[in-house]
Amino acid sequence: MKKAEQYVQAFKSYLQVEKHASSHTIYYYLNDVNFFLDFLQTEAIQFEQVDPGVVRVFLTQLYDRKLSRRTVSRKISSLRAFYKFLEREDVVSANPFLRLVQPKAPAYVPSFLYEQELDKLFDASDLDSPLGQRDQAILESLYGTGMRVSECAGMTLDDIDMSIGTVLVRGKGRKERYIPFGSFMEKAIRTYVEDGRRRLLEKSQENTDKLFLNSRGKPITERGIRLILNKLVEQSAVHMHLHPHKLRHTFATHMLNEGADLRAVQELLGHEHLSSTQIYTHVTKDRLRTIYMNSHPRANRE
């Protein structure tokens, strides 16, 4: 399988250089490809010899393992992309995964936070300390713009334009977009930059333009932001699991529930396809009741 490993490395370079895929995407693509190569080695089949019959045996084993339809669908997508690359490199003559029908994933409704839960989170930080000011600015940035945690960690001082209230965000595939922000985020970032960030930077004496710093004064990582959110949950005594994407879900849900245009939210989130944004078109029961009471001619109760 040495030759296969070489093509896996070439596929990785292709994803990085040509597709500008995120490290998260690359990890899962390569994990799925290597999983399939292990299966081929067990079956004594060369990766160039894979045909639809081999693929069906592979799928049978996936279902025997009780994997979810979402996981199976992802593996098919990864392997379809891998063999498309091999076909382009003239390693194989046809893509055995091309016409494979992917299992329909169950309907997914993203979880989000209610305003009462958000209020508790926003009240949790100690705004007199550098770390508390930073945590508040991170929370306001994630909820105020709907940006991804990787985009938040990558922000620089120059990306923030206070004069017009916009932030330059570098998203997936190195695509850039501008997102407007409001007074709460502006106030949090001003406080942090003028006080907290300056004090944190004194610890490292490092010349960095990254906006958010860790407790040692160095650029914060995605993992660091996740740990901060977990800490805020503990401090606020809110009983929930909070991941950065949940704030992104909340941003989109609240925007749409308040009447924002779907395509405008798509642009703000940096989604390439509208279908990715449509998962947020669910409405809360309270919002549904309000719409009904305000809209139906015979809904008014006196």
Image (tube, grey):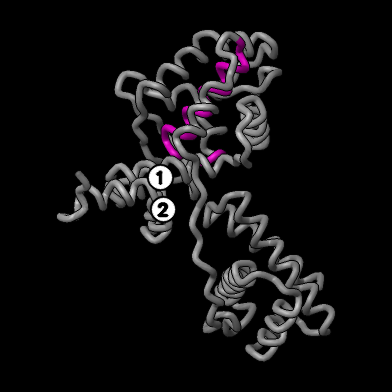
Kindly indicate whether the residue at mark 2 contacts the one at mark 1 (C-beta within 8 angstroms): yes
- Check if residue 191 falls in the magenta segment: no
Which residue is more in the foreground, 179 or 34?
179
Picture quadrant where residue 31 is located: bottom right
The answer to which of 108 and 270 lies nearer the viewer is 108
The residue wearing badge 1 is 252
**On residue 96, which mark appears?**
none
Q: Nearer the viewer, residue 196 or 172?
A: 196
Of callouts 1 and 2, which one flags the residue occurring earlier in the amino acid sequence? 1
Q: Is residue 156 above or below residue 24?
A: above
**Above or below 32: residue 229:** above
The amino acid type found where label 2 is placed reads: Tyr
Question: Residue 170 in the image: x percent, y percent?
Answer: 46, 39
Q: Residue at x 48, y 22 (%)?
A: 157
Please identify the quadrant where the N terminus is shown: bottom right
Magenta residue span: 129-149
